[in-house]
């Protein structure tokens, strides 16, 4: 073995022992080197390109990277060296990044809306209503006042009508708002004892209607009207009327009556009154525990129309159910577990019907359901367990009105 090959063998052994790559280090090629297959050298295979430095043309006909002069991309837009283009502003001016290369239409002129922030969702306005405790506290404050000029005795009696105790004691109620006063003056003139307005009230048509009905018109200050109102904002007009109601007629051959079990929300009860009037109900029976129909919020919720619906209130529903059954009524209770709808009941049972709707949270009293002749449910998606009591009453009233038409 020659000395050169012997040295190479020793080196490869040492490289293998100490983890150095077994691949021999590539030495620089010389012009006269040839590959092992007897072919041309690397530089020969490259053709005429020869050795080039970094920055010269790399391969083929491509130009170098930094010292090259690029071809024009646009007319008058020749690029120079790296970081700069001929005929353009330097970085930071209104050039490539800060300015417009071509004219743009103004966004607003294109007819599109401009939002500088996310548009706020439109929320339904909900009228803020004072509760009974707040109204009683207001009355107590006025009654304890010693200012007889600002709080005369007649005003204190008027203010007492904003509470349940005051209405029971005086036998009167308040009807607040333009629509309510119009309803009371037009359809219940005999019950209206007086109308109160503020100095700024300017509904001339209503004032003329009140004068034609020969109802006394009184003027209050804004502060006095505000204390009488059951809401945070007032419409500047309020009527005082006597408590009265017309009882339903139970002797009719066809009739639809609503039994109300402990509905406590005044807005719901007001809506039930309006629905009953709208679908030709023959009357309503308000069981004990149900909010008073003369509550200002009920009066407002019904737009004053509650007096056009015959009704009885503060009634023992057990006695009333037995009474109605004796008059030929079929007692129908709403129940989430019922197996049938109203239309699945035989029509001969629906000539005289009294359907029972219950409390907002607890629903209809289970004892009343046991007393009922039939139980019904409202067919709806399984995604929802129950409906608002006023909504459920509206659906049943609509179906009952259709059934009564078919029975004629």
Image: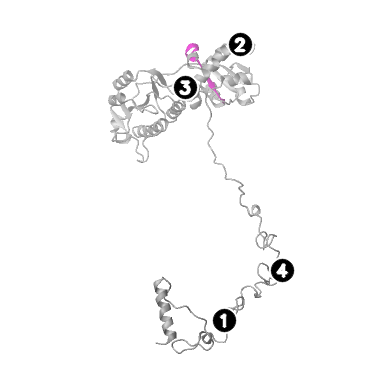
Real-space Cα separation, disc 3 to disc 1, in angstroms = 100 Å
> To which residue does mark 1 refer?
60
> To which residue does mark 2 refer?
152
Q: Which mark is residue 87?
A: 4
Give residue 274's position: percent from left, percent from top.
46, 28
Examine the rendered structure and indicate whether residue 114 appears above or below residue 124.
below
Disc 3 or 2, which lies upstream in sequence?
Answer: 2
Examine the rendered structure and indicate whether residue 23 appears above or below residue 406.
below
Give residue 57's position: percent from left, percent from top.
60, 79
Q: Nearer the viewer, mark 1 or mark 2?
A: 1
Q: Quadrant of residue 195?
A: top right
Q: Is residue 176 magenta?
A: yes
Residues marked 2 and 4 touching at CB (< 8 Å): no
Count residues near mark 4 (Cα–Cα under 10 Å), then give few for <14, some for 14-19, many for 20+: few
Q: Nearer the viewer, mark 3 or mark 2?
A: 2
Real-space Cα separation, disc 1 to disc 2, in angstroms = 108 Å
Disc 2 or 4, which lies upstream in sequence?
Answer: 4
Q: Is residue 326 magenta?
A: no
Quarter of the figure that contains the N terminus: bottom left
Real-space Cα separation, disc 4 to disc 3, in angstroms = 87 Å
> To which residue does mark 3 refer?
307
Real-space Cα separation, disc 3 to disc 2, in angstroms = 31 Å
What element does badge 2 sit on?
loop
| Pick the front one: 228 or 68 | 68
Give residue 408's position: percent from left, percent from top.
35, 32
Disc 4 or 3, which lies upstream in sequence?
Answer: 4
> Residue shown at 48%/25% (left/top)?
305
Image-based side of 288 in relation to 210, left or right: left
Give residue 376's position: percent from left, percent from top.
31, 32
Disc 3 or 1, which lies upstream in sequence?
Answer: 1
Q: Which residues are magenta?
A: 167-177
């Amino acid at each position: 073995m020659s000395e050169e090959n012997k040295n190479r063998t020793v080196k490869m052994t040492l490289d293998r022992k100490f983890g150095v790559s077994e691949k021999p280090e590539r030495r620089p090629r010389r012009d006269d080197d040839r590959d092992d297959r007897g072919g041309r050298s690397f530089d020969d295979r490259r053709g005429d390109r020869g050795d080039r430095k970094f920055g010269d043309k790399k391969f083929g006909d491509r130009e170098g990277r930094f010292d090259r002069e690029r071809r024009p991309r646009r007319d008058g837009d020749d690029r120079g060296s790296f970081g700069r283009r001929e005929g353009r502003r330097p970085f930071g001016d209104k050039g490539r990044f800060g300015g417009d290369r071509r004219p743009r239409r103004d966004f607003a002129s294109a007819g599109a809306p401009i939002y500088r922030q996310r548009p706020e969702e439109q929320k339904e306005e909900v009228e803020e209503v004072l509760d009974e405790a707040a109204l009683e506290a207001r009355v107590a404050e006025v009654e304890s006042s010693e200012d007889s000029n600002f709080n005369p005795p007649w005003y204190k009696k008027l203010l007492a009508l904003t509470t349940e105790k005051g209405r029971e004691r005086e036998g009167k109620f308040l009807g607040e708002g333009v629509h309510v006063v119009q309803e009371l003056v037009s359809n219940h003139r005999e019950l209206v004892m007086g109308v109160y307005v503020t100095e700024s009230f300017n509904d001339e048509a209503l004032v003329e209607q009140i004068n034609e009905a020969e109802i006394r018109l009184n003027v209050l200050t804004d502060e006095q009207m505000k204390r009488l109102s059951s809401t945070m904002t007032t419409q500047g007009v309020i009527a005082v009327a006597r408590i009265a109601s017309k009882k339903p007629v139970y002797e009719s051959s066809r009739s639809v009556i609503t039994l109300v079990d402990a509905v406590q929300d005044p807005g719901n009860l007001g809506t039930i009154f309006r629905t009953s009037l709208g679908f030709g109900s023959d009357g309503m029976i308000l069981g004990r525990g149900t909010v008073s129909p003369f509550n200002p919020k009920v009066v407002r919720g019904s737009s004053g129309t509650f007096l056009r619906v015959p009704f009885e209130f503060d009634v023992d529903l057990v006695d009333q159910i037995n009474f109605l059954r004796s008059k030929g009524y079929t007692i129908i209770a709403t129940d989430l577990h019922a197996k049938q709808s109203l239309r699945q009941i035989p029509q001969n049972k629906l000539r005289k019907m009294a359907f029972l709707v219950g409390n907002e949270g607890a629903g209809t009293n289970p004892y009343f359901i046991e007393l009922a002749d039939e139980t019904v449910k409202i067919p709806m998606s399984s995604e929802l367990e129950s409906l608002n009591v006023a909504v459920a009453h509206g659906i049943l009233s609509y179906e009952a009105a259709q059934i009564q038409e078919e029975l004629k």
